[in-house]
Amino acid sequence: MKAVEHSPSAEQQRTAESIPLLPVINVHFFPCTAQAASLFAEVAQSRQFTRAHVDMTEGGIPAAVQVYQERPTPELLVVESAADRAGLFQELAALAEVTMPETQVVVVGHLNDIELYRELLAEGVSDYIALPAQPVRVVAALASLFAGDRMEKLGREVVFMGAKGGVGSSIIAHNVAWALAEDWHVNTAVVDLDLAFGTAGLDFDVHPAQGLIEALESSDRMDSTLIDRLLHKCSERLMLLAAPGSMDKVVPIREQALDMVLETLRETVPLSILDMPSDWHDWMRAAMVQADQVVITATPELASLRNTKILAERIKGLRAGEEPPLLVLNQVGMGKRPEIPAAEFADAVGLEVTEEIPFDEVAFGEAALKGRMLLEEAPKSAVAQAIRRLAARIGQIDLPSEEKSSPFDLGSLLGKVLSRGGNKK
């Protein structure tokens, strides 16, 4: 058993969002009480265990000793003991006889004693967790054993997905990425995952010769050098892994290949924005589970509400115990179109509305025609203010209080739109 320095108090401060994924390892849980069995089952369902291979066998440490007399121990062994102090050390002595040196052993027990914790670490146990314990506490403890210095190097990944086509998820994702890169100097990569109809190249007015297709086809040799070559620099801090934007070049996306690309991006870029197509595909599951945050964009009408509810329930099921998706209502205040009020929309889908983005066809239209971001074309508009607030939320950036609470003035916005239309006449 290999000793690892550990700080329980630091782990308890971590949020579920910041806990890194476990690598592709074997994990074996050995509970001896129903309480621990339930806890371990919940831990194994967390997104951090997506790539790990998990087994569970009842019987605690004695069962583990019996199992591993005949086969090698896994990379991570989590065992529960209900014994007293003397009994616990007797059980661990037997376990040590069958445990490989490289196996990380975590003990879950019922004695909350700091001296016991120190003694166990001195004996080579990787960590000791006293029951009762929150699942996030256990997940953080286990994930940290395999993170080490690498944890500080891992970037964040945020998924943007529209409730249906035409809600503006891509343009919001691209403007959020632009704001983070240009306004707050965060090195940001946009990954356009809509292979046939992706618009990132158009929105950023670039035409990369290679991008996501080449990355997926080269996933078996993916590393930071290759990903750097495939990322197109839109500006000093904004990069794009572009879709071909052609049905002739579309290839099936394999989860394993995409996982390798995204993992390399995490190690290369501090923040990646994943721009998803609006229709659901099986390969999206891995990206949704592994993402640090998911943003659903919807419009305030019935079809979008129905789809948002379905999508939110699917994502919550994939990301049990994680922060729910952020909900962005776009195209709010579109002329005479009947709209569902934000509060009613939120109640119906079971999510809070993170941001309401007003409808401004002139600002968006002019930006699109010029191949510029809306934040460049109309930086002081109500739309730009809403997108910047969303970008700050995603980038975990503190805004001045006046910017946090500056909802758009729909009357003023409509006046500007009508004024622009009148000037054109």
Image (cartoon, rainbow, N blue to C red):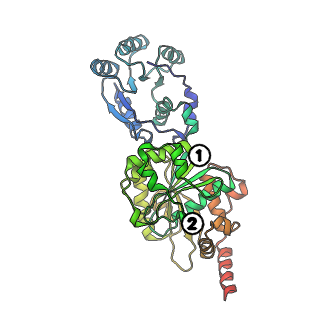
Instruction: Determine the residue positioned at 59% across, 66% down.
Output: 205
Q: Nearer the viewer, residue 20 or 347?
A: 20
Residue 43 in picture, x, y percent from top left: 41, 36
Depth order, front residue of 144/416: 144
Picture layout, residue 255 above or below residue 24: below
Q: Which residue, given by chain and number where applicable, does mark 2 sit on?
A: 203
Looking at the rendered structure, which numbered label has been put on residue 270?
A: 1
Residue type beneath disc 2:
Asp
Residue type for callout 1: Pro
Q: Quadrant of residue 37?
A: top left
Quadrant for residue 38, please give it.
top left
Mark 1 → mark 2, Cα distance in angstroms: 22 Å
The spot of residue 411 in percent (x, y) is 66, 75
Q: Position of residue 251 (x, y in %)?
A: 38, 58
Mark 1 element type: loop
Look at the numbered disc 2 and give the secondary structure of its residue: helix
